Image (spheres, helix red, strand yellow):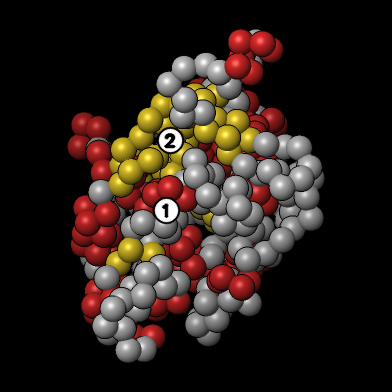
Amino acid sequence: MPNGLPIPVIIDCDTGVDDALALLFAVRHPGIDLRAVTCVAGNTDVDGVVRNTLTVLETAGAPVVPVARGAERPLVEAPRSAAHVHGRDGMGDLGLPAPRRTPADVDAVTLLRHEILASPRPVTLVPTAPLTNIALLLRTHPEVTRNIERIVFMGGAAGAGNATPVAEFNVWHDPEAAAILLTAGVPITMYGLDVFNRVVVPAAEVHRLRASAEPGARLAGDLLAHRPAAPDTTAGGPDETAGGLGDAGALCAVVDPEGLTTHRLPVEVSLAPGPARGQTVVDRRSRIGESELHEGTREQALVDVGLDVDVPRYVKLYLETVGTGSGGTR
């Protein structure tokens, strides 16, 4: 927190089990001033994302935060949900009640532009979803970059993918949008699968959260139990399953960047049809190769790529945060 002030943050999400975990953290951490949440199709359809987002904010007891509906589909591709991971409703089919809150009466791009430019201090933009809304914002209103401190996005991979052998879901869902993000001209941190999969809450802590009388903490426990990341050796049932923080780790990296080891590396998105489409090609070589020697170099975006993470540090940070009251929202 620079000068002891909370960080102005806007989240663009496709809520989603782990997007919900990220929202719970953002609402409750006193170092975050959550200014808005925008929604995009991804883990489920965009109307389901809006519903899930409002439900999470309501359950967490968040102050009023504007929530806006965004893109229904990627720039080029057809929408492809992740219901096999997040359930039919995108929230693990937990049977959560419909929210009483309603979304803003403007679209996501309009809300993003307004909140970024209206912020008294530069905003940290945290996309935890396919990057369609962000690409539309950057192409329609490029002036917003003057008041963006950094973009910390959950997406991509320097190693293996999950949607394909080489492509991570958020980037694979809308590769053209991800390529536009990399041209934003602001500092970018990539919180990709290389660290995403490693931050796992132990089974005992998941069980403790699920037994909480406080609705937000209990929801966090139920969500963690839905997405087992590493079965505990003593696991005997759903109440004793370790759960991955997923997208919430990107919010941990916003308030505690020292817990994430990054390397500033050239990154580009593969847009060609075929098995590599959607891959984030991260150049980790120490020197140029034959391709550059024979064909010349291409301009590539330099990105702070997360390659290592202090797992106990982020697990502790998350658990200490989700059990507290509402944080520094306006």
User: Which residue is painted at 52% across and 33% down in the image?
Assistant: 282
Residue 177: where, in percent of width, then height? 67, 39
Residue 31 in sight in this render: no
Residue 265: where, in percent of width, then height? 46, 27
Q: Is residue 221 left or right of residue 37?
A: left
Residue bearing mark 1: 196
**Mark 1 residue type:** Phe
Q: Residue furthest bottom?
A: 236
Q: Nearer the viewer, residue 159 or 18?
A: 159
- Could you give the CA–CA distance between mark 1 and mark 2, rounded to whole angstroms? 12 Å
User: Which residue is painted at 30% across and 47% down in the image?
Assistant: 309
Dividing the picture into quadrants, the one containing residue 8 is top left
Residue 250: where, in percent of width, then height? 40, 48
- As drawn, the label of residue 12 is none
Q: Earlier in the sequence, mark 1 or mark 2?
A: 1
Q: Residue furthest front?
A: 290
Q: Are marks 1 and 2 in contact (CB under 8 Å)?
A: no
Helix, strand or loop at label 2? It is: strand
Residue 65: where, in percent of width, then height? 46, 56
Residue bearing mark 2: 305
Dividing the picture into quadrants, the one containing residue 183 is top right
Helix, strand or loop at label 1? It is: helix
User: Which residue is painted at 53% across and 73% down in the image?
Assistant: 91
Answer few, some or many: residues within 10 Å of disc 1's Cα (few below 14, many 20 plus, some between 14 and 19).
Answer: many
Dividing the picture into quadrants, the one containing residue 311 is bottom left
**Mark 2 residue type:** Val
Answer few, some or many: residues within 10 Å of disc 2's Cα (few below 14, many 20 plus, some between 14 and 19).
Answer: many
Q: Is residue 145 left or right of residue 25?
A: right
